[in-house]
Amino acid sequence: MSEPTPQSPPPAAPPLVEAVGIVKRYGPTVALQDGCLTVRAGESHALVGRNGAGKSTLVSLLTGLQAPDAGDIRFDGEPAPPLADRDAWRAKVACVYQKPTVVPDLTVAENLFINRQPQGRGGLISWRRLRAEAAAVLDTWDVRVDPDAVTAELSVEDRQMVEIARALSFGARFIILDEPTAQLDNKEIERLFTRMRGLQESGVTFLFISHHLQEVYEVCQTVTVLRDARWITSAPVAELPRTALVEAMAGEAVAEQERAAARETGPVDAPVLLAAKGLTSPSYTDVDLTVRRGEVVGLAGSSGSGKINLAETFAGLHTPTRGSAQLDGEELPFGDVSAALKAGVGCVPRDRHGQGLVFGMSIGDNATMSVLDRLGRFGFVGGDNKRAFADELIERLDIHAEGPDQPVSDLSGGNAQKVVMARALACDPRLLVLINPTAGVDVKSKESLLARMAGAREDGTAVLVVSDELDDLRRCDRVLVLFHGRVVAEHPAGWHDHELIASIEGVDQEHG
């Protein structure tokens, strides 16, 4: 009896997406020198790196917005389509950006089928078919959103799911998520991750870009690191310890720096700068709160806890229905941002795009707009005065820019946030209110922003910081936890993650 002929193993399927030896230059600037990426079908693949590492450039090449100067991009083993063939690109890949690409005033159904609405008699849009087809798309991908809902009224997470559904309706099965959790709270993030896992099981592949490394470990199977416009490493997430990942991103041993958050707490006998009594509004109830000179107090809680509205109240954005607050012994005005600024409150708002920056203006104009009265008399501001002041702020906050005249719209997320911080610090505030100050910024910018928070503390400023980031809250002398609008716990420095998370989630602690 003859021996059976050994069967050769079936050829491995080509990667869903492959980029090899990618080079992209803008004049003398090398944006990507050695970009490499291999994404297998059905996985969630993390792309990480500090701002300027080349992530955005690689995404623009993977989505066909630009062509590489050298190297190859392939989908399912086939060369990428020509740039002009937008339909072919849409059928392969889509990116859901931090800033929405949906039209806010249109309904969900209209956004899903914008520029390709089903037509009825006479070439007119068939609104009945539009709603039916939109409902079918949403149902197919388990997106529980009303097709007739106006998109502007959706939550951030629902808007993201509409954008994902729109991409999938073109046939794309490779979705790039660019900082998808930057504006979500913990519960919303967990729901997003659950949906991502469900879509993966349905054959969708994700490239996940995030500065929050714990999310990479929670939702991704593979990670690729870029640094200084070059590919550094790709590895299974389970085989790459967090310290090694941080060091690959930074090119230096920053893990120790990152862990060095524990420090002496603020002086307990320092005078109270901010004193709030009985503050009540639709978002929070009967809040008493003090912040001493040179003290950093954190506010933690879920999205419905009232923490952001409470912090915004001190910055003049809201008026409570009852209660009062004093700053350095003087009544703090409510519901008037300019009055709060004059009273000595500096604020980094939650949305740098919508609230924090004027994108048509320069870095210098943005950084100094809160102190123009100090730079000139009778409403006239000398250009030299403003430039010198802006130069000093750029240097103080290590803003990577060509100078104060550069448009703020040219900046990376981390540097844009530093401009917002520069403006908040420009008026030498007595109270500094920081709302999600490190959301959507890279590791290095995050350390720089937190160093400025520590610097304000050392200058004797009272600091109130709202954040969903445990690393931010570790820099606080105390953390107050709000649950359904009430302060339910206070944690001194040195708390353990599980203790704080239990308070945020409203889990009663057993005493024993």
Image: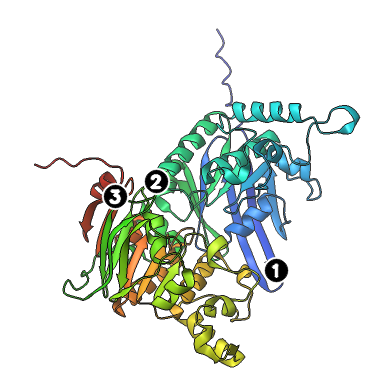
Residue 443 at what x, y percent from top left? Answer: 44, 62
Q: Of callouts 1 and 3, which one flags the residue occurring earlier in the amino acid sequence? A: 1
The residue closer to the viewer here, 379 or 238, is 379
Query: Which residue of the protein is positioned furthest toward the left in this rendering?
Result: 512
Q: Quadrant of the N terminus?
A: top right
Give the amino acid type for the residue marked by disc 1 in the picture.
Tyr
Nearer to us of marks 1 and 3 is 3
The residue closer to the viewer here, 306 or 57, is 306
Q: SS for tag 2?
A: loop
Q: Residues at badges 1 and 3 in contact (C-beta under 8 Å)?
A: no
Estimate the spatial distance between the alpha carbons at disc 2 and disc 3, rounded to whole Å. 11 Å
Q: Which mark is residue 26?
A: 1
* Label 3: how many Cα within 10 Å (few below 14, some 14–19, many 20+): many
Give the amino acid type for the residue marked by disc 2 in the picture.
Gly
Q: Of callouts 1 and 2, which one flags the residue occurring earlier in the amino acid sequence? A: 1
The residue closer to the viewer here, 497 or 4, is 497
Q: Which residue is mark 3?
A: 486
Q: SS for tag 3?
A: strand
Q: Which mark is residue 304?
A: 2
Res 52 quadrant in image: bottom right
Side (left or right) of 142 relative to 25: left
Name the residue: 22% across, 55% down: 490
Name the residue: 69% across, 41% down: 111
